[in-house]
Image (cartoon, rainbow, N blue to C red):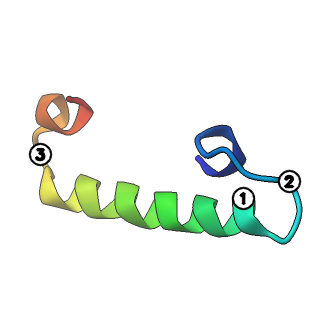
Amino acid sequence: IGDAAHAMVPFYGQGMNAGFEDCTLLNKLMDDHKGNLEKFLV
């Protein structure tokens, strides 16, 4: 999530913004696959 998953410079807050976007996507995926942990992890 954030700097760890995206190639970018560590300034301008790009990593933080990418982290927010990653968390938003992760939350959506968790909602989409609620009750089916195996499908969520694949």
| Secondary-structure class at tag 3 | loop
Could you give the CA–CA distance between mark 1 and mark 3, rounded to whole angstroms? 31 Å
Residue 12 image position (x, y, % from top left)? 85, 71
Crowd rating for badge 2 (residues with CA inside 10 Å; few <14, some 14–19, many 20+): few
Q: Residue at x 67, y 44 (%)?
A: 7
Residue type pointed to by label 1: Gly
Q: Is residue 12 left or right of residue 32?
A: right
Quarter assignment of residue 25: bottom left
| Secondary-structure class at tag 1 | helix
> Which residue is label 3 attached to?
35
Q: Is residue 9 left or right of residue 22?
A: right
Could you give the CA–CA distance between mark 2 and mark 3, rounded to whole angstroms? 37 Å
The one nearer the camera, 32 or 4, is 4
| Secondary-structure class at tag 2 | loop
Q: Residue at x 11, y 45 (%)?
A: 35
Crowd rating for badge 3 (residues with CA inside 10 Å; few <14, some 14–19, many 20+): few
Between disc 2 and disc 3, the foreground one is 2
Could you give the CA–CA distance between mark 1 and mark 2, rounded to whole angstroms? 7 Å
Residue 14 image position (x, y, % from top left)? 73, 66
Q: Residue at x 65, y 69 (%)?
A: 17
- Residue 15, labelled with which disc? 1
Residue type pointed to by label 3: Gly
Q: Which of the two discs, 1 and 3, labels the residue nearer the N terminus? A: 1
Q: Which of the two discs, 2 and 3, labels the residue nearer the N terminus? A: 2
> Which residue is label 2 attached to?
10
Q: Are marks 1 and 2 in contact (CB under 8 Å)?
A: yes
Residue 27 image position (x, y, % from top left)? 36, 61
Residue type pointed to by label 2: Pro
Q: Quadrant location of the C terminus?
A: top left
Residue 31 image position (x, y, % from top left)? 21, 61
Q: Are marks 2 and 3 in contact (CB under 8 Å)?
A: no
Above or below 39: residue 29: below
